[in-house]
Image (cartoon, rainbow, N blue to C red):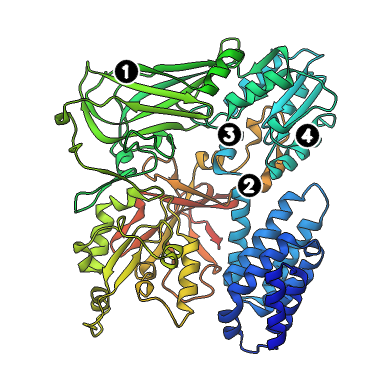
Amino acid sequence: MKYSLYLARKYAAEGWWDRAIRHYLTVLFTYSNTEQREVEFSDEFRTVLESWMCYSRNAESCLSALFAPILNLFPKSVPIITLLSEHVAGNALFSADEGESGISSYDSLKAAINIECDPLMAAVFRVSSANVRSCDFDQWHMLMINDKDRNEKFLDALRNTIVPTDYVLDIGTGTGLMSVFAASCGASKICAIESNSSLYNLAKRILSLNGVDSAKVVRDYSFNFHPEDGDSADVVVSEILDCCAFGEGVIPTFLDAHLRLATNTARFIPADVTLFATLIESPTIYLSHAFTSPSGKEFRSEYVRCSDETQPEPYWCTRISDLPDMKKLSSAQQVIMVDFGNVNQLHACINGVSGGVKIPVISSGTLHAVSVHFRALVWGDEYIDTSENTCWEQGIFPLSYPIRVNEGDSVTVRWTLKGTRFDMVLELPLNADDLQLPRSRELVLRGERDYRTMNNDMLLYAITRLLPSVSRYSWNLDINLSDEETSVVRNLPHFLIDSKDIEGAFGGELDEANSDLSIIVWPIRADGSVSEVFLNSLRSLRSRNDVPPSLKYCGFLTDRLSAHGVLVSSSRLSKLTRVQPSSSCGADLSPIRMYNLLEYRDIDISTFEHHVCSNEFKFLHLGEEDTELLTKRIEVRCTCAGLVEGVLYWWNLENYSTRQDRGAFFIFKEPISVSVGTVVSHR
């Protein structure tokens, strides 16, 4: 056995993955103690298994036959089951139009998990598979597909632009919808380009389903596309516009199309884009990007300019209508207009352009940010305006400090545009008295942190009731963690607390000699969901005998959290999560149903339109060691009639609830029509 283990590790180190897998399986089947095998080999085998699936040409043909043996060896290994689930779920989506191999592997793994593993691992399989779908088809993509006004305006633009002899180039085709529209408008030739592999396959299926078999679909970036026949496009359509229009590369993409891919008289859709800026008041924005420690240190997110150097991320994206405390302090002022038909201007934007605009204040208040939206000319005098009620969010430029402004004042904004990056900065008043906080303090950049949670006084109070000593501490943003600690904590909000304080909270005897700092983690992410990565790390830690002292109590809060929810009806939720046939202007987009979302996160419950259809119920307690917890069936009685879309859920900690702040939805596969008294049964 020792020699086989030596060979397994030797072959893995040398990259002989087929031999390594064979020897690992030989060794592992000699272990009769399942728990010992998982503790000693789970992480090591997962690494080798992942490499084998990535690099071995034999992996795809052999993997299905190995599902049962692998799961028999590691029936409770979340990392291994997650790896297998994500792999076969990705193949099922990717290979859906190329045969049944991906789908049969998916079904084989599902069957093997049901036989070899407990119900908890079956839940891990479902969650991991859903995560793959959400990675390939983001939350915002479904809303874009269901934006009927957007679809109608692009269809009208193509209908009024295309003549029967036109060659149409569709860059960033996504689902292929624009190419379907182009075919219905009589284009003689269509080429659709898409770099994302899953969307490329989806576009091919949708084009074929809509009878557009003559269209050429290319899997690549347009910069790498070289037409074999040398044809130049008469019409170029692309909707690679982010919330500030230019972040997805529309300027270099259209310039490249002008220079290589289109005729000199080609028409571009959209024809131009104009950016507008609005001054807004919203304490929520400030609290989402700034934190002041008890020692007086000022921390800021990666979206805030902390010095003369540009910040890592130019702007934050959100829908300002969803902010519960948003107030507009100015009307929208034009910042810059880019004509996509003007090659000289596109060249200038690549090299960099800049300017300034004075924005008059029309309502007194506290200025927290500048909001940017765009207006795109699609054809004639038809525009898409993203200031509100579209699939696009707005770009937010948070201020480093709030500023008090009065009606009649003017605020000067300086902007720069270079390639794909648009930046904006305010000329702050020289008089520091105009600021609500002293400008003399140093601003410290800490990116990827949940500032909104750290500014939540109600949460801090609830934690202090459990751990009174927390009142002496603050959320940790200042002390470096070891690599192992960082791998567990990630970017979740956490405290560093004296171990004696925690031991006292448990009511046990205090070890006065123990003065180590212990990490206490808040496991709920900024989007309202629990961090699965942290839960997996916590489970792995608790299976070890050598837990680092600093991580001994990292699950203190996790063990006291419970999930609560209500059944909800919401037409808005339906548009966000399910393809709506009525929005596609006659195109058949039914293949997108495979991407219908099973979960929707980052909800401000106070502003999200929904109707509650049941009393509150508890369905999960993270501290319970119950393997059937995630799979048990829950029955809920409806308190009103309607079309139930899913479950709105939040987290409770003692007397605190995240319902006051953020929530998320579990989405039913299909809406359920209910009456008063109907019992809805779900997992």
Kind of residue indicated by mark 2: Asp
Residue drawn at point x = 74 percent, y = 28 percent = 180
Kind of residue indicated by mark 3: Met
Residue tagged 1: 359
Q: Earlier in the sequence, mark 1 or mark 4?
A: 4
Q: Secondary structure at mark 2?
A: helix
Q: Crowding near pointer 4: few (<14 within 10 Å), some, many (20+)?
A: many
Query: What separation in Å lies between label 1 and label 2 (alpha carbons)?
Result: 40 Å
Q: Crowding near pointer 3: few (<14 within 10 Å), some, many (20+)?
A: some
The answer to the question of whether label 3 and label 1 lie on touching residues, with beta carbons closer than 8 A, is no
Query: What separation in Å lies between label 4 and label 2 (alpha carbons)?
Result: 18 Å
Q: In the image, 142: left or right of 438? A: right
Q: Earlier in the sequence, mark 3 or mark 4?
A: 3
Quadrant housing residue 268: top right
Residue tagged 2: 136
Q: Position of residue 607 (x, y in %)?
A: 38, 40
Kind of residue indicated by mark 4: Val
Which disc number belongs to residue 217?
Answer: 4
